[in-house]
Amino acid sequence: MNIRAPKDFWSGLMFIAFAAVAMLAARGYSLGGAGKMGPGYFPMLLGGVLALIGAILVGRSFVIDGERVGRLHLFPLCVIAFGVCLFGVLLEPLGLVIALIVVVLVSALASRESRPVEAGVLALALAAFSVGVFVYALRLPLPVWPALLS
Amino acid sequence: MTSFRFSDALLWSALLIPFAAPQALAQAYPNKPIRLVLPYAPGGATDFIGRTLAQHLGDTIGQTVIAENRTGSGGIPGTDYVARAAPDGYTIVMMDPAIAINPTLLPSLPFDTFKDLQVVSRVNSAPLVLVASPTLPVKTYDEFVAYAKANPGKLNFSSAGIGTSPHLASELFIQRAGISAVHVPYRGIGQSYTDMMSGKISFAFSSFAGALPFTADNRVRPLAVSSLKRGAIYADVPTVDEAGMKGFEVDLWYVILAPAAVPADTVGKLNAALVKALALPEVKAAFAKIGAEPVSSTPQAGTAFLKSEYEKWRKVILDANLQQK
Amino acid sequence: MDVFANLTIGFGVALTAQNLLYCFTGVFLGTLVGVLPGIGPVTTVAMLLPISFTLPPVSAMIMLAGIYYGAQYGGSTTAILVNIPGEASSVVTTIDGHQMARQGRAGPALGIAAIGSFFAGCVATLLICVAAPPLAAIALNFGPAEYFSLMVCGLIAAVVLARGSVVKAIGMVVLGLLLGLVGNDINSGVRRFTFGARGLADGIEFVALSMAIYGIAEVAYNLEKKAGQADVMSRIGRVWPAWADIRHCIPSILRGTALGTLLGVLPGGGALLAAFGAYTLEKKVARHPRTFGHGDIRGVAAPESANNAGAQTSFIPMLTLGIPSNPTMAMMIGAMMIHGISPGPRVMTDRPELFWGIIASMWIGNLMLVVLNLPLVGMWVKLLRIPYRLLFPAIIGFCCIGAFAVNGNASDVLVMAFFAIFGYLCLKLDCEPAPLILGFVLGPLMEENLRRTLLISRGDPMVFVEEPISLGFLIVSALLLVVVAAPAIRRKREEALQE
């Protein structure tokens, strides 16, 4: 059997995967009855529906023709996701200025067109702008400098 | 994918080197702004009380006090943040009865209320009001109790979620009155008023601030207040205690807590400034707007109070079998 | 008519120099925070609440109200320019708005959003003047059963608005519902799907999720195009919408306004459903629905009109009943209480200068917004001239700050990174994010109302069809389903006949 609609096939698998995680986790929550529904009732129901939809998509993908999945370019995606994670990890210990410079520089690596000096200037400018707007003007509780220094 | 040159790599890494910031000099406490963590969403009663207090505490302690919202369910993330903060007295938290309820209600907490934190002072006292749907054929507290007893299992009560003070107040009330009723949780008591007006919800314990807009024109009926003495607001409504349920008292209090390792003299300075701030007439007037009254205490009396509240709610939770597994 | 006397009082209050200044401050700040990611009206109102205590109550309320509806204006700007919806209700605007920007038509998109919002704001305000009490009565008739059925209806509408496969759209709605359930269950207190992570106890943060699957995933998708191709946006066409565009949009603006006005009155998700509903409606009445999703200007005009009309009428339950329709309104109720005013039916009679002053100020505020925003369109469009290699790291940086700033929680940033990857896969698989977002926002509300209904009815599901309003929504849902299914069935039959 050939997969004739790869986009549907993979979407279906993705739904089934989410449904499986949801239903496995929801096993631990009590179902209850209609009068006093437990915390597991609605998730179980939704998980079942999602699995069914996933199965329909997968099944259908063998019968009906559909589009192919375009090439995945994982490099820029992963670089950016990594940069975002770094920001999350660095912000509280090192402060906004450093975390922002890091995320801007790291995500700049995701594009072939970025130039180091330009990205550096951009990072510094954004850090100055953000400290000015978010910390001083809007008074959001963001640490600006490394926690050890203040 | 990306063509990478060594010179570029050097430049990149040079850019990623962090820079230094000026070092703060050590002086007598408090020599820098104090952060008062408010563990609930902005806009509610906690936020109002906390911000009012922060402003006046700043004056009495001689340093800026910054109110900072660190929200999260049950106030846990905010409290946990302070429990782990440096024990230098620059990070404190204002918490509501959830701090006494959660240790019994929840299977685990990231901190130990009594070991990781210490009470600096109490902040206020704010009673709740028992309100009933206008669709019920009752006008007074006595009629309500009689009606509830005659119709077991027919009534519904709303709350701001499981384990919140309004919920536990109703549970305590039900247990002591010998009534059976169904608990219907909402995201906030305010949301439940529409259903109370139409009769789907029969009664609830609500904060004064939440109930006033609806009792002002009798769209819901105030039956009794949960303090032992009547206050300025709802002066014509009896207390639950005087209406027959002796000793029934539920309070939406706040306490200021600091990390347990903060030295006693720092706590003393904070406590003195808090006591002074809570005695200000402006603070009293501001608190009165939402039906609260400033109450200060010594750290020891605050701790004893917290323990008694913990014991009280522990019993209610265990009797109603509400604890989470 | 009474209305004129009342409006005279209102404008008398709103047109004083002091109140004009506070109104301007409000709408200006609102626009600003609407544009900045992560900081919504809730945060801003909270920050300004302490200042507002020192003002006279009318000025305070005028300013806070301005922040609220000003943010609705600002939210659509980023939705169109960089595909980041500032608010749940501008999610729909990204669908056609950002497509227009990519085709070099960001100017007309922003322009029509401003014009549509202005018109909708004026009409909705007028309606509050003449019909606030009867409209408030609608909200009073909505119990848990009605809300549940309304949400069923809204979710089915979300499937209709999908561009591609209906099955996938349903899948995305259901997945959104599931994601919405992460965190504390208010009925039992059980923490669901947190997998031990404390950062998930309050659920997945909306701002983090929407910035991830719209903003960041979009950036990753753009970066894989060959050099030069990503800069399509910098080809700027005209800055203003042409008269033909505006005329083309008039019916859409009217329909959007009508829907937004009605649904805005309902507390909880009303304004959001209005934007989704308006888009679906346009797609259904359009002669060539295929242009939707590919930069149809009506796809911007209708939801923007609807969400601004909804933003105005969501003041009705607050001002006339004292019921908060969303967190910002809850804060405004708090502000009124602190000024010693009990919101409720008596505000209108006891404090007419406050009630009518706020309403008159909304009209003035809408005018200010349009005057403030239309000249800004030129500036925003110029922003797109910035080379993408400089624009995209800035987008990522702002998304990070925004995700952290909402709750001051670093784990929200990590959640955003996870969903960026998920969002990219969805883009590649043609799974549309809009139905997912609607499901995500409505999921918890839907479950709560379902469980609440059944708790109150002691487990009897018949209440959903016994209550007339609820039954009405269920019938509409069934009809919508038929509408969705009909073309597919017809196609199948044609295929069968050909064979």
Image: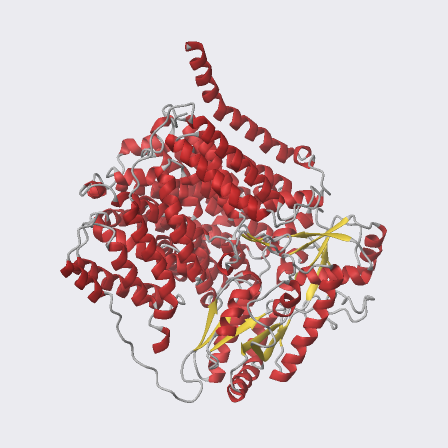
In the shown orientation, is residue C77 left or right of residue C233? right
Q: Given the current orientation, which residue lies at the most extreme front position?
A: A1
Q: How is the image coloured?
A: secondary structure
Q: Position of residue B6 (x, y in %)?
A: 15, 59
Query: Residue at the location (24% across, 65% down)?
Result: B16
Quadrant of the image for the C terminus of chain B? bottom right
Query: Residue at the location (25% across, 45% down)?
Result: C223
Quadrant for residue C92, please give it.
top left
Q: Is residue C123 above or below residue C287?
A: below
Q: Position of residue B13 (x, y in %)?
A: 22, 64
Q: Position of residue C225 (x, y in %)?
A: 23, 41
Query: Residue at the location (56% across, 76% down)?
Result: B116
Q: Nearer the viewer, residue C86 or A90?
A: A90
Quadrant for residue C149, please give it.
top right
Q: Position of residue B186 (x, y in %)?
A: 62, 52
Query: Residue at the location (55% across, 63% down)?
Result: B44
In the shown orientation, is residue A114 left or right of residue C460? left
Q: Nearer the viewer, residue C228 or C470?
A: C228
